[in-house]
Image: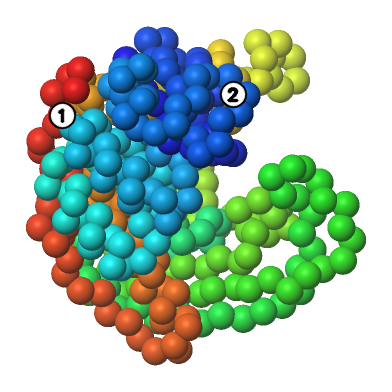
């Protein structure tokens, strides 16, 4: 399979690097505004890329303002798309993008968080029924649509309307790390914390808690809580009732090679819950971090879907719903008033996404 990139910034470069470890997947080039030295051929526009590179699908990794244009152009040419998050910046943009591209069934969203080993294991544990029916998910680790994806996925809310309430506070916080590594800045800077509640009805709710830079700031814990009718998952431990009149606490255990006298090299192997394997690294020996494992899994899933050999990885309808709720969080925090989301055109699509798949070799 062959794919092309739209853009070649930080995220696109990471996608290209990860794709190189996947057998049978070839990046044929990147569409960039200004020609420059790249590890792949550079194209001026999509038509030149289609003519010379002949990709089977396009991966967009551009600014959210530019994303809808690339997605729409690809769909108009019958080319499947894996679009970086979010699919559009505002509600009007989401609706316009859905009108232009949604009915085609050609668009997937590059939402990788539920594919990260820890989250994938937690999702498997929740779906096993060990805590009963999930009723609330609290996320304090990542921002906006990524956190919403975790909340929706772990709750299984689909496209249910939600009433959102949110507040913001500002407090000083040291920021020791960014994309470039250690900042060396010894002075705390003002950081904004947004806390929101999302009420989906029927006893289901979410709590969103994010501080500026928290994704990379190791001075803030990452926290994830899933409350259910029969127990609770807190980060990597579950409290539940395996038998009547019996309360048990069972950990999720990651098997990480390379420690102590294990000379096989640093790698994630499995995450287990007792004797149950919740997650097994699909790329053993590749020495990938969790985000890289998730992106590799997403690219493999996209390749299988384009071939007609697998389900859609994360349809546009799901990415649009994540962004819809993100915009509601921001509006509620801006106005200090509750915001209730409406039923949107993409909500007619089932939670699993459109059944239509592009023909292999489109």
Residue at the (37%, 25%) spot, across then down:
49
Left or right side of 295 for 37: right
Name the one closer to the observer, 272 or 150: 150
Residue at the (79%, 63%) spot, across then down:
174
Name the one closer to the observer, 81 or 179: 81
Residue at the (65%, 59%) spot, across then down:
213
Q: Marks 2 and 1: CB-CB under 8 Å? A: no
In the displayed structure, 107 sits above or below 131; it is above
Left or right side of 66 for 17: right
Closest to the camera, between mark 2 and mark 1, is 2
Residue 177 % position (x, y): 75, 50
Residue at the (74%, 43%) spot, across then down:
180
Q: Residues within 10 Å of mark 1 (few under 14, many from 20)?
A: some
In the displayed structure, 162 sits above or below 14; it is below
Residue 219 % position (x, y): 73, 57
- Report the residue marked by disc 2: 38
Give the quadrant of the N terminus.
Answer: top left
In the displayed structure, 343 sits above or below 319; it is below
Q: Which mark is residue 358?
A: 1
Name the one closer to the observer, 68 or 351: 68
Left or right side of 19 for 39: right
Left or right side of 58 for 159: left
Residue 17 % position (x, y): 55, 23
Question: In the rendered image, is residue 228 in sight?
Answer: no
Residue 240 % position (x, y): 38, 53
Q: Quadrant of residue 47?
A: top left
Give the quadrant of the C terminus.
Answer: top left
Q: Residues within 10 Å of mark 2 (few under 14, many from 20)?
A: few
Q: Quadrant of residue 132?
A: bottom left
Indicate the secondary structure of the residue bearing disc 1. Answer: loop
Indicate the secondary structure of the residue bearing disc 2. Answer: loop
């Amino acid at each position: 399979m062959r794919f092309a990139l739209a853009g070649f910034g930080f995220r696109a470069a990471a996608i290209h690097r990860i794709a190189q470890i996947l057998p049978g997947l070839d990046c044929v080039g990147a569409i960039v505004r200004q020609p420059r030295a790249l590890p792949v051929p550079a194209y001026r526009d999509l038509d030149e890329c289609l003519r010379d590179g002949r990709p089977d699908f396009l991966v967009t990794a551009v600014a959210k303002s530019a994303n809808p244009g690339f997605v729409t152009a690809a769909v108009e040419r019958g080319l499947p798309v894996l679009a970086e998050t979010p699919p559009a910046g505002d509600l009007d943009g989401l609706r316009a993008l859905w009108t232009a591209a949604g009915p085609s069934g050609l668009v997937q969203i590059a939402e990788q968080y539920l594919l990260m080993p820890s989250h994938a294991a937690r999702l498997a544990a929740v779906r096993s029924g060990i805590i009963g029916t999930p009723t609330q998910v609290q996320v304090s680790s990542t921002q906006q649509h990524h956190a919403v994806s975790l909340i929706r996925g772990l709750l299984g809310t689909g496209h249910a309307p939600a009433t959102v309430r949110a507040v913001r506070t500002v407090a000083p916080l040291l920021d020791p790390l960014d994309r470039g590594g250690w900042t060396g800045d010894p002075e705390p800077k003002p950081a904004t914390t947004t806390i929101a509640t999302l009420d989906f009805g029927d006893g289901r709710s979410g709590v969103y808690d994010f501080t500026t830079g928290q994704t990379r700031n190791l001075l803030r814990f990452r926290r994830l809580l899933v409350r259910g009718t029969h127990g609770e998952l807190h980060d990597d431990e579950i409290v539940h009732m395996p038998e009547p009149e019996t309360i048990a606490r069972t950990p999720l255990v990651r098997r990480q090679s390379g420690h102590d006298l294990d000379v096989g090299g640093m790698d994630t192997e499995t995450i287990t819950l007792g004797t149950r394997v919740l997650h097994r690294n699909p790329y053993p020996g590749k020495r990938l971090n969790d985000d890289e494992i998730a992106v590799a899994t997403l690219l493999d899933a996209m390749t299988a879907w384009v071939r007609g050999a697998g389900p859609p990885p994360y349809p546009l309808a799901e990415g649009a719903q994540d962004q819809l709720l993100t915009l509601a969080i921001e509006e509620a925090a801006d106005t200090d008033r509750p915001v209730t989301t409406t039923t949107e055109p993409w909500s007619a699509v089932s939670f699993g996404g459109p059944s239509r798949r592009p023909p292999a070799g489109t």
